[in-house]
Image (cartoon, helix red, strand yellow):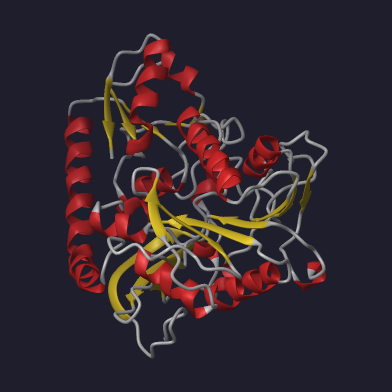
Amino acid sequence: MKCPVCDHPELRTFFKVDSVPVFCNVIYPTELHATSAPRGTIELGFCDRCGMIYNTAFEAERVEYAPGYENSLYGSLRFLNYAEGLAERLVTAFELKDSHIVEIGSGRGEFLDLLCRHGRNRGTGFDPSVSERETVSHNPSVKIYREPFSSAYQDLRFDLLVSRHVLEHIPEPKPFLGELVSAARRTHDAGLFLEVPNALWTLRDLGIWDVIYEHCSYFTPVALRALLSEVGVHRTKVVETFGGQFLCAAARVDGQASAADDNAGDLADLKMWVEAFQQKFEMETKLWNDRFLSWKAANECVAIWGAGSKGVSFLNRVNTRNTVSWVVDVNPRKQGQYVAGTGQPIVAPEMLRAAPPTRVIVMNPAYKSEVESVLCALGLFVEVISV
């Protein structure tokens, strides 16, 4: 297939994995429902012209975002502090005072609420995965529409358009972003802010558990800049945030954006990491399988901390049977539910007191210190290992 960013006629396949859950962020009410979750194939192709990575085996008709999709991270103080700081920086950079902000893929409105509170702004969010009872904000200036943003809202005027962790789910990112940029241009001097997972971190730092079916599009820094340039937003600075795990891009769609970041990554390095990825993925998976085999032989109990995409991906690739009996998550909406594919129950941290594990595996290294603090407060002094 051709590249969805630059239309290069061929993507070079470099990685394949079968039988992965179609949804990592859908939780299930019973173990049977969870183990019967639909599965698909990931086959990543690389564009050596613009650096884009795409799942060429992705079937868009299998992925529908509706109530029950749960990916909020705001139960973590570490993530909340990150979001607070980001909101403050955006309010300052775009001079958002008494302004109107639109967020695509707003979830329950957590980040939109932060933006509005920091600048006495009003916000409008769009997200079809939110149920009628789930809007988190009690701010009367924040309104969430439980539907995708569309041409029906072409008369909507705003000062900043935000899209965080949406583009990676879009099978045709260029026309999608083009429509958002066109909407922003209808308002003079409107700003645009994008945040996506950093595929360079996945390749370079072996964040291999971020390769999930829901993400059909994987953006490296050069690919995100190329996509913005394709839709007429040029010389946009792309920066790594959240320990390198995210990419952020901010620009005025009608103005002169800041100069491009020369250190964002280049195609020569990308090609090197792409060529090594399948082998490194298999080596890392074997390493964890060997560890769990030894822990199982020693009759040790291990807890996984994090029932998000990383945790679900890990559990479905590594043989943790009879070693991991439950998965911990601070998100109360996940607690009492079951992990897609493997069927382990998801529990609150307090449940570990009943049967203290030998060690805790933290699925995201960004949260290791926070997890250690929670365990200490619970009186549990166990080994904590980050993936």
Q: Which residue is the extreme one toward the bottom? A: 9
Q: Residue 97 in the image: x percent, y percent?
A: 70, 44
Q: Nearer the viewer, residue 241 or 24?
A: 241
Quarter of the image that includes the C terminus: top left
Q: Can residue 295 be seen from the camera position used here?
A: yes
Q: Residue 187 in the image: x percent, y percent?
A: 73, 66
Q: Residue 92 in the image: x percent, y percent?
A: 57, 44
Q: Residue 23 in the image: x percent, y percent?
A: 52, 55
Q: Nearer the viewer, residue 129 or 92?
A: 92
Q: Nearer the viewer, residue 7 or 119?
A: 119
Give the residue drawn at x 64%, y 55%.
Answer: 105
Q: Nearer the viewer, residue 332 or 21?
A: 332
Give the residue drawn at x 61%, y 70%.
Answer: 254
Give the residue drawn at x 67%, y 44%.
Answer: 112
Q: Which quadrant of the view contains residue 119?
A: top right
The answer to whether 38 is drawn above or below residue 170 in the figure is above
Q: Which quadrant of the view contains residue 385?
A: top left
Give the residue drawn at x 61%, y 40%.
Answer: 29
Q: Which quadrant of the view contains residue 51?
A: bottom left
The answer to whether 356 is drawn above or below residue 26 in the figure is above
Q: Which residue is the extreme one toward the top? A: 379
Asked whether, in this view, residue 73 is left or right of residue 143, the answer is left
Asked whether, in this view, residue 238 is left or right of residue 278, the answer is right
Q: Can residue 58 be seen from the camera position used here?
A: no
Quarter of the image that includes the N terminus: bottom left
Asked whether, in this view, residue 229 is left or right of residue 184, the answer is left
Marker count (numbered): 0
